[in-house]
Image (cartoon, grey):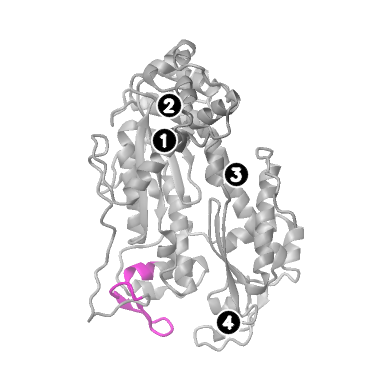
Amino acid sequence: MLEKIYKGISWCLAWGDKKEPQFDISILQKFYQSNNENEVPEELLSIIDKVQKLQDIEVNYFPEKIQDLQHKYPEIWQEKTPIGLVYGKATKIKQYVFEAAKLTDIRGASAILDKINLEDLPDFFERDTKSRNWLDKERNFPLFSQALIPELKVYSTGGNILAFCPAAFVDDLANAIEKRYTEETLTANSCAVGSTFRLLEIRFGLLQENIENTLWLNWYRQNHTDSLVQSYFGLSEGKTEEKELRENFQNRKSFNELTSKLAALFNQRRNGNDFNNNVHENRPSRRYPPMFETHPYLRRDEGDRRIAAMQTDLPNNPYYSEVLARKHLVGQITKRDARQSWYNKGGFDWKPDTNNIDNWVSKFTDFIVKDPELAKQYNPELQKLEPARSLRELGNVYQGFVAYIYADGNNMGGYIQKIKTPEKYQQFSLDIFDATEKSVYLALAKHLKPHKLENLTDPDNENRNDKWIHPFEILAIGGDDVMLIVPANKALEITKTICEEFENILERTGRYIPEKSTYDP
């Protein structure tokens, strides 16, 4: 039986290399709904058989000669229908999130990106979602969505998305990812790239047009000391054993080599370079990022970045551009602040999808509720809690001081380079996101307690005295990245616990062996 990711690969082969499917769409739908081999349409059995054989290749199998693949897997060798693979993410995230100084605006910017990363882009592949309907609009990518199914997603967590798609839609999917970021944020940078690969390449890395001409193990053994070869396959100095050299080559010649190619294309496009080849000649250039002109004699917004579009009736009557207005509105929504009528007076067309804008405090609460002992430890008096609305409220917890915590996974790239198959990529991505999120919640619950606001005197928060708040702010949790604001006196304890719990959670999955610490106190 095909695993999910291989069902997605089968879908790409069954669709073909044109925008119109090579089989009737009803046949493809019947295959998608099938639960076992007996339900697969007869027309697609040969395709499913090839993908099944690819899936069944043992993890540690690697041919001594490239021709061995032709003898052992002739059907996969001969399959030339291209399969699309697309990678994309937001770039310069901190520039977008922290260009405003107020916590509500920072929180709103982070929430907008989280919604795109965790809701909008994954929903491209789901049925009957708002993102799917957005794709189908005439001004976007009509009829494209019928080529997408959930099984095409390799991962879509932490601000990154990697997904298969039928070959003809590679550019459409990459363009849709970039357009979604721009349409929702106006100014946040994003980048997406894609390419096409053959079925055999998914398991054994990039191959020549004539597969038998691909440089293989014998060539690597003779040239592994060359500096260019080492820069591509990794250092081989000190690796004289046949097993070590073989492992070095095998780690590169896998699905990892495909993602590495996309990473190189990503860096080229992010830097403003256009692709001059027939495959991607129709993609819009990314060398001209969104800009909103300013003028020395016109009023600018609160961040001094752009021309103001409106003056609000919020405390201190701030001026907002549309970019800043969106951030502030979403920041209010995440904290359930009902004072949102000001936005409607601006005459903006953009309306947030309030049902899908979640906040990390709610997720934190949902997490600790599942563990009554942890919930009691965090909130022993069962106070009714609210999120903090400003940095002043967070500073009220400890003598006016707060600490920013930024955590990032160590040597994730080095580990990923050893992942050989798309299903392992998928599992690793889910495990890392789950461990990162849970480790943050555990650390906050173990080291913090609810705080009662006192002695607030500013006009915009003096009415908040005597309210009980969560004494932290989660700005972002994405993949292996974390950004938090916590009371200054608890920062080191929280950071230490996040790191420890992250390792413990991964170890409990049974899929990862932690490296022994080299630190000897």
Query: Mark 3 — residue?
Result: 431
Q: Quadrant of the N terminus?
A: top right
Q: 190 left or right of 392?
A: left
Nearer the N terminus, badge 4 or badge 1? 1
Query: Mark 1 — residue?
Result: 228
Q: Count neighbours of disc 1 (C-alpha within 10 A) and say few if under 14, some if 14 to 19, many if 20 or more.
A: few
Q: 357 left or right of 317?
A: right
Nearer the N terminus, badge 4 or badge 3? 3
Q: Count neighbours of disc 3 (C-alpha within 10 A) and say few if under 14, some if 14 to 19, many if 20 or more.
A: some
Q: Which of label 1 and label 2 is nearer to you?
A: 1
Q: Which of label 4 and label 1 is nearer to you?
A: 1
Marks 1 and 4: in contact by CB < 8 Å? no
Looking at this view, name the residue that lies furthest to the top. Answer: 71
Marks 1 and 3: in contact by CB < 8 Å? no
Tell me the distance, in whole angstroms, between the alpha carbons under discs 4 and 2. 60 Å
Q: Which region shows up in magenta?
A: 304-326
Q: Quadrant of the C terminus?
A: bottom right
Tell me the distance, in whole angstroms, between the alpha carbons under discs 1 and 2. 22 Å
Query: Mark 2 — residue?
Result: 201
Q: Could you say where residue 164 lies in the image, as x and y percent from the top left?
A: 41, 35
Q: Secondary structure at mark 1?
A: helix
Q: Is residue 228 above or below residue 270?
A: above
Nearer the N terminus, badge 4 or badge 2? 2
Query: Mark 4 — residue?
Result: 464
Q: 437 left or right of 191?
A: right
